[in-house]
Amino acid sequence: MKKKIGFIAASLLLTFSCNDFLDIRPEGTTEAEEMDYTKSANIFLPVSAAYSSMRGAHAFAYIGAFEIASDDADKGSEPNDGAAMKAIDELSHTSATETFNELWSNFYGIASAANYAIAQMPLFEAAQQDEANRQEARACQAEAKVIRAYAYFNLARLFGRVYIVDKAYTSEELAALPQASTVQLYDFIEKDLEEAIPALPEYYAKEWAGRITKYTALGIKAKVHLYQAEYDSVAACAGRIIASGRYELLSDFKTVFRSEGENSRESLFEIQSSTLGQERGTAPYIEYAYFQGPRGNSPSNMQGWGFCVPSQKLIDFFTARGDVKRAAVTLLQRGTKTPEGDSIKTRCSNPYYNGKVYTPSSENKWSYNGYGFDHNVRILRYSDVLLMYAEALARGATPPAGVSKTAAEALNEVRNRVGLPDAAPTLDNVLDERRAELALEEDRFFDLVRTGKAATELTGFQQGKHEVYPIPATQLQLNLNLTQNNGYN
């Protein structure tokens, strides 16, 4: 996908992006160029643009709201850099914190691109003479529905209550949209996923690696149910993935986060990032890893902004449980040299950085900095599926028919991979394993929220307020139907 789809997405975003956004906000419409619906080669193009739209949403603001807010990460960087990230880290943010308007616009931008692709596919299907091409159009529409569901899942977690944009609207119509409840949002998300799953293939050939499959959709659906405490449904969705036999844990935990581990048999969903082998120019890369690279390091392709650094609390957690292998991968320490020969200089601003986004200097070929430009953002891994399954059973879910794996087997498959002994599949053990396995992968904050542990674990967390972020002040001015979340003025 990085060589083929990534290039298509980069060029198509220029064609289908919202360059002429409505004055009110960017998420409502997507301008279309002339399209020949009889050409089968064009079918994937709108979906490619939807994939491309996801890159911008998984960068600085995403890292802040989904990870820096947690107890596993600190803001990092320099003390006076990143005022918005500091506010999020300290849970002192307000509706005027610009990060939230950026997140709002970014995820609505994904939904908008997906809406366009969804609307285009019936036109392609009707124009195609070959049944295989018609099937491709149906599968592409299903892909776009999963992308849209993923965008709204993030909007639901971030803001709790937002409006639903499922087609192109005029500026007046956008300004009049009602604010959906969280329940309505989850119903909309589940409907998209349920409609998509039967139409999606089980896998793609290697040249299309990274595209959304049936199991991607099932994995996202499992997590959507997890956030609603619908544990039988979690077990059912995760169980189908397990029973498929298509996924397995890589033997080496480190490989999961290196270039050779991208789109592997452990991966269900990654946001693709690539320089396409270039050293300069236009390329579909994401600065997700660059924003977290060692601050003040050298040479220039081995440094970044230094945000989202491991907290002392996370370091102590790894130490207390004897979690040596995962700590070695997750914690990139100042004053050390990596096995690949890269030095993390003692002059770097912070004692630790996110080791999961480390990329060797030999791979960072961009002419100016370029740290981690080829690093995919891992969204859903098989270990997450195993732990969702174990959690659902630990919470009393009925084991799904046709799945022989027990909660203990699922939990210990994850533990044994990193050299840890078997543990009983208690809820506390499973949740601890989630924290260790998924550290600094943008899960911890909302895991604390959904399990009711945030007020205990997060300094400054106010129950009844900080479970969601504030509706951005800008959006409240644009749509008077929006009401602010509790506790935010």
Image (spheres, helix red, strand yellow):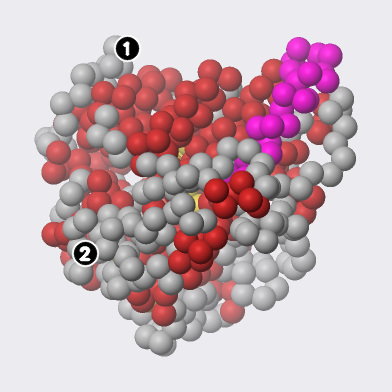
Query: Which residue occupies the foreground of this view, 323 or 94?
Result: 94
The x, y position of residue 245, in whole percent, is 42, 22
Q: Determine the main secondary structure of the stretch shown in magenta.
A: helix
The x, y position of residue 227, in whole percent, is 30, 39
The x, y position of residue 181, in whole percent, is 37, 42
Residue drawn at point x = 87 percent, y = 25 percent: 38
- Asked if residue 154 shows in the view, the reply is no
- Residue type, mark 1 in image: Gly
Is disc 2 placed on a helix, strand or loop?
loop
- Residue type, mark 2 in image: Phe
Residue drawn at point x = 54 percent, y = 60 percent: 478
In this picture, residue 207 sits left or right of residue 489: right
- Image quadrant of residue 74? bottom left
Q: Which residue is mark 2?
A: 461
> Can you say which quadrant of the picture contains the C terminus?
bottom left
In this picture, residue 83 sits left or right of residue 431: right
Residue bounds of the magenta highlight? 109-134
Is disc 1 placed on a helix, strand or loop?
loop
Does 438 sit above or below residue 410? below
Q: Is residue 467 magenta?
A: no
- Badge 2: how crowded within 10 Å, few (<14), some, or many (20+)? some
Residue drawn at point x = 68 percent, y = 39 percent: 116
Q: Is residue 114 magenta?
A: yes
- Asked if residue 36 shows in the view, the reply is yes
Does 167 sit above or below residue 371? above
Count of marks placed on residues = 2
The x, y position of residue 430, in whole percent, is 20, 41
- Badge 1: how crowded within 10 Å, few (<14), some, or many (20+)? few
Instruction: Give the number of the disc on residue 402.
Output: 1
